[in-house]
Amino acid sequence: MPVQGDEAAAAICDVIRRIPRGWVATYGQIAAMAGLPRRARLVGHVLQNLGTGTKIPWHRVVNARGEISASPSRNGGDALQRQRLEKEGVEFDDNGRFNLERFRWRD
């Protein structure tokens, strides 16, 4: 039986908590590891609804193109995400991308 509701959100957050400092994982990767294949949008929804003081390292979740998923609804969260990733050693190029294969977490 598929995981749903609060169980799905908990599974997603559990995977995200395991991403080590200086590494990233894609939305799809998180979904698959949480037992929710093809539910990358659900990962984004869960992240969007985290509280501002969360201890979950949301900034380590990126899109499959090796970019931060920019959105006006994040109220400056895009810049904060990049700042946090750079502080952890993730290097961005002039186009705002990073080498996903180099920085992708492989559990």
Image (cartoon, rainbow, N blue to C red):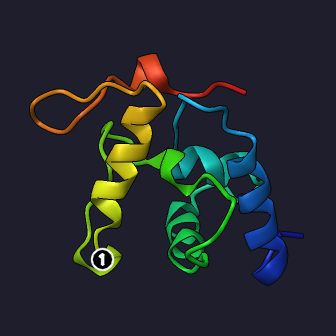
Residue 38 lies left or right of residue 107; in this view the side is left
Whether residue 12 can be seen here: yes
Q: Nearer the viewer, residue 53 or 58?
A: 53
Q: Which residue is mark 1?
A: 75
Q: Residues within 10 Å of mark 1 (few under 14, many from 20)?
A: few
Q: Quadrant of the N terminus?
A: bottom right
For the view shown, which residue lies furthest in the top direction?
102
For the view shown, which residue lies furthest in the left direction?
94
Q: At 80% across and 61% down in the image, what residue appears?
A: 11
Q: Residue 30's x, y, as percent?
A: 63, 49
Q: At 54% across and 30% down in the image, what residue appears?
A: 23
Q: Nearer the viewer, residue 64 or 56?
A: 56
Q: Residue 34's x, y, as percent?
A: 75, 53
**Up-down: is 49 above or below 83?**
below
Q: Nearer the viewer, residue 64 or 92?
A: 92
Q: Secondary structure at mark 1?
A: loop
Q: Residue 27's x, y, as percent?
A: 51, 52
Q: Residue 18's x, y, as percent?
A: 75, 41
